[in-house]
Amino acid sequence: MLKIKAYAVAQPVALNRRTGEELTDGWNLPRQTIYIKDNKYQRLDAVSYKEIADHQTEFFERLDKIIKADPIWATKNGWDKLPKIYNDPKRYSAADLIKETISHYKRRHDPTLSMLLRQKYLIRKLANELGDPSVINDWDIGITFKNPTEPVLKKFYDRDIFTQVATATTYTDLFGAKK
């Protein structure tokens, strides 16, 4: 498991269509990208960035190999059309998420919260389908926010995706309470 401490920093303005209409996320709230950074103004240091990028890239490359090795199993288990993952605006296939994540890091973009949440979802789906909980221990990402009161995080707290503890804010086991 990769553990990180970082700031959640949102785009300054919600995204708009060319027509000026505001784009919304899967919860029908204004769509904003939330970046994982060292502080409000600075990218992650090279070591932290490399750890996150390598961890996510390696997981998605391995997932890609699993899906390509047995496409019938992958289709049967819904990897070709996943449900909406948290506040994603639409449904994606695992192939879409793999391509997007690997491309994102090849372009040296900062990690985003949506990418971390997608990986958490996919790890648990994979662990459940393989009957191997060690997948979670090996590939999960735990994050402690240094700015847990950031307004853009409120929608995640409101839906119990994060649990706020008196001394720290961390990811909950997103599927622990739902079993």
Image: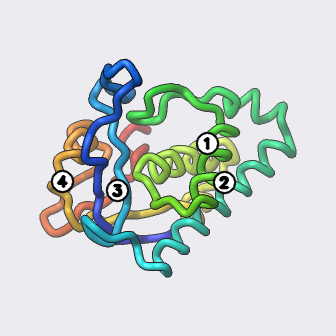
The numbered mark, 3 or 1, whose residue comes first in the sequence reads 1
Task: Answer above or below: position of 28 versus 71.
Answer: above
How packed mark 3 is, by other alpha carbons closer than 10 Å (few <14, some 14-19, many 20 or more), is some
- Label 1, label 4: how many angstroms apart (C-alpha)? 26 Å
* First in residue order: circle 2 vs circle 1: 2
Query: Who's the residue at 64% across and 52% down the image?
Result: 103
Q: What residue is at 26 percent from the left and 41 percent from the top? A: 13
Which residue occupies the foreground of this view, 132 or 80?
Answer: 80
Q: Position of residue 86 (x, y in %)?
A: 41, 35
Query: Are the two marked residues, 2 and 1, in contact with CB atoms closer than 8 angstroms?
Result: yes
151 displayed left or right of 12: left
Residue type, numbered disc 4: Glu
Helix, strand or loop at label 2? It is helix
Per the image, the residue denoted by label 2 is: 60
Residue at disc 4, secondary structure: loop
Q: How far apart are the two marked residues, 3 and 1, measured between alpha carbons? A: 21 Å
Give the residue pinned by disc 1.
97
Q: Nearer the viewer, residue 98 or 107?
A: 107
- 25 lies left or right of 146: right
How far apart are the alpha carbons under marks 2 and 1? 8 Å
Specify the amino acid type for callout 1.
Leu
Mark 2 → mark 3, Cα distance in angstroms? 20 Å
For disc 4, the marked residue is: 150
The mark tally for this picture is: 4
Residue at the spot of label 3: 171
